[in-house]
Amino acid sequence: MAKESARSEQDFQKVAERVATVTILGNLILSVFKLMAGIVARSNAMVSDAVHSASDVFSTFVVMIGIKLASKEADKEHPYGHERLECVAAIILAMVLFITGLGIGIEALKNVFSGSYNDLQVPGCFALAAAIVSIVCKEGMYWYTRYYARRIDSSALLADAWHHRSDALSSVGAMIGIGGARLGFPIMDSVASLVIFGFIAKAAFDIFKDAVDKMVDHSCDEETENQIYECVMKTQEVRGIDSLHTRIFGNKIYVDIEIQVDGSYTLIKSHEIAEEVHESIEKNFPKIKHIMVHVNPDPN
């Protein structure tokens, strides 16, 4: 079991590293391309979008560090493992994402409230083309990262996927703003930057909330708990369940359960039933890392 667990952690890390390498290279190329397009085509929205893409590179490094630390085996000082370090990485990512968006939003607000709309430059066609390229590329990165995040059940990698999706949405805002500016409404470029900030802030909040839920021993969803209940009750000797508590620890689940068995059973027999329940849960729910089974005598 220990060897299988170690092999699983190694596979987890290899997949995460491969995904990170692909997205880092993609974001570096895309951010340079969008920055050049923003400068050449005189689009503040596209420059803002380029900064957003550049922040994805940093965020992916944060995710990789978190995943690497979370994959470490349990030790004397951390007997329950290091899974929560992945949540720490997700929280840092959310903060970086929000701060990046805040800078974009503040600059856009200055332009909106300046009142000198006629002094704003009209973006060129290059910026519009760059926005379309960005939407396609970032949406592709989102689906690519999301697929592997769900495959290895990584909350930090899933957070990074949503970072890509927020960038794709911000590029949609940039495209609309640039198009509006070219149609004779220069202020639309700055309005688009404000819309981009809204998308970034929403993504940051969702990532932060998900990570905090996993940090504070949030229980599983009701459907999962019902499935565990049904799984335990399939054990022939179990007469009932007195209590069932679950908690999410990083990307793993811990279960504490009290079952009822015949009060006349010997300690050895009761222990065997508890072992059977333990093995049944472990077999049917791969995400469950630790199970504590307590046996109570049936009062009837």
Image (spheres, grey):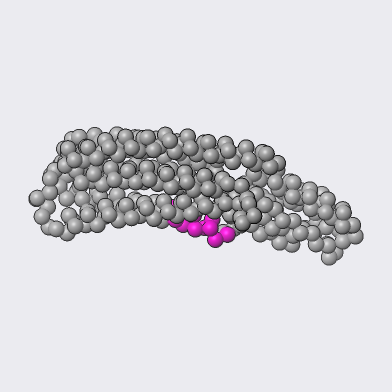
> Is residue 241 in view from this perspective?
no
Q: Is residue 135 above or below residue 281?
A: above
Residue plotted at (56% across, 59% down): 218
175 vs 280, left or right, is left
Q: Position of residue 100 (x, y in %)?
A: 32, 52
**In the figure, residue 50 lies in which quadrant?**
top left
Residue plotted at (65% across, 41% down): 5
Q: Position of residue 285 (x, y in %)?
A: 66, 45
Q: Quadrant of the N terminus?
A: top right
> Is residue 106 in view from this perspective?
yes
Q: Residue 16 magenta-drawn?
A: no
Q: Quadrant of the C terminus?
A: bottom right
Q: Position of residue 85 (x, y in %)?
A: 52, 52
166 vs 230, left or right, is left
| Viewer-side residue, 184 vs 150 | 150
Residue plotted at (66% across, 59% down): 245
58 vs 146, left or right, is left
**In the figure, residue 130 lies in which quadrant?**
top left
Q: How many marks?
A: 0
Residue positioned most to the bottom: 299
Q: Position of residue 2 (x, y in %)?
A: 68, 42
17 vs 5, left or right, is left
Residue plotted at (14% across, 58% down): 114
Q: Residue 216 magenta-drawn?
A: yes
- What's the magenta bit mostly, secondary-structure-wise? helix
Which stretch did the figure color magenta?
Answer: 207-217
